[in-house]
Amino acid sequence: MKEKVVTGITATGKLTLGNYIGAIKNMIKMQNEYDMYIFVADLHALTTYIDPKILKENKKNILALYLACGLDANKVTLFYQSDISAHSELNWLITTITNTGELSRMTQFKDKSQNIVKQENGTEMIPTGLFVYPALMAADIILYNPKYVPVGIDQKQHLELCQKLVKRMNKKYNLDFNEPRPIIPQLGAKIKSLQNPENKMSKSDKNENASIYLLDKPEVAYKKIQKAITDSENKIYISEDKPGVLNLLTIYASLKNINLEESERYFKDKDYKELKEEVGSVVKEFLEQLQEKYNKVLNSIDEIAKNGANKAREIANQNLLKIQKAFGIK
Ligand code: ATP
Ligand code: MG
């Protein structure tokens, strides 16, 4: 039997090149070998305010982009998180074994709650949902009892908490769920913002020039790469002290399916202008091909999500019942 794998992407915005390189590319590599449950995390998107119309659009875009990027609905199970009510039900049970101290140590909570305070001009408006996000994420995972969870580096802390919670739940309630292990890509686990290469590229970044969106017009994406922040040295080599250059070398390597050292060798005698032109062209070509496929799959996503939910629901409900019985409510 194939090992189970679970992963998802939050419907907070339009998918970026970071989501592709750090997450989706890995899923595609794994789809032949594993029994994969891949969802669109629409419940998680509600943890900070989002316009309902935009959320609806984001959901569909992400499902279609999963397919356009190369996930095959005959091999993996694709679904919307909110179609399976077990996610919300298990979430509650998981919050009862999660300490508030553990949640307040999560760096994503600290970062995201700080942004909210800034937006609200000093008034504190931090939703409880944002605080308990990692408990819902643990529920998302536990419902399918996977061995692995492919994620980018930013999700490592949440996954470690999930492992701890599974261990605690198993011990307290005499259960035997797997402690899921992260699979983090060797290359591109943290693609950086084009405008502030110290930070990661994020789909919820307000600065449109900071991210390449997978549905950006290819020429727009090309221009964003030309505007990417680098440094003043004009020499190309791998160094953590040159995050802007390292980011462009990483994007090039990932899209060309070569390693970082090969990418460095290729650009060794070139200058920043040539680097940006070449990376821009590769990104442009990648988006052109991707968007052609995207337009073709758009009609089929409702059917695919429905079938995926039917399959996912069966497994999720079985595991939920097992946990409900162990907790004493069934
Ligand atoms: P948000 O800003 O709303 O948190 P996000 O771009 O961080 O959005 P998530 O939905 O949180 O996206 O993450 C989806 C997946 O993409 C996760 O596996 C995450 O680790 C990965 N990921 C997100 N951003 C990057 C990035 N810049 N580089 C590599 N992987 C990334
Ligand atoms: Mg994120």
Image (cartoon, rainbow, N blue to C red):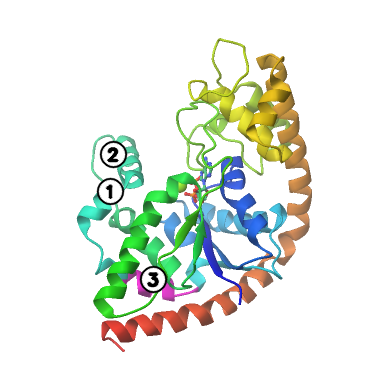
| Disc sitting over residue 88 in the figure | 3
Mark closer to the chain start, 3 or 1: 3
C-alpha span from label 3 to label 2:
27 Å
Eye-nearest disc, 3 or 2: 3
Residue placed furthest toward the bottom:
330
Mark 2 secondary-structure assignment: helix
| Label 3 lies in ligand 1 vicinity (Cβ under 8 Å) | no
Relative image position of residue 9 (x, y in whole percent): 52, 55
Q: At label 3, which amino acid type do we have?
A: Ser
Q: Residues within 10 Å of mark 1 (few under 14, many from 20)?
A: some
Q: Tell me the magenta residue range.
A: 84-93
Relative image position of residue 178 (x, y in whole percent): 42, 70
Q: Residue at x 34, y 79 (%)?
A: 175
Q: Is residue 227 left or right of residue 197?
A: right
Q: Which residue is mark 1?
A: 126
Picture quadrant where residue 198 is located: top left
Magenta: predominant secondary structure element? helix
Q: Is residue 262 left or right of residue 149?
A: right
Q: Is residue 305 above or below residue 15?
A: below
Q: Which residue is mark 2?
A: 117
Q: Is residue 144 visible?
A: yes
* Foreground pick, 270 / 50: 270
Q: At label 2, which amino acid type do we have?
A: Val
Mark closer to the chain start, 2 or 1: 2
Question: Tags 2 and 1 in contact by the CB under 8 Å rule?
Answer: yes
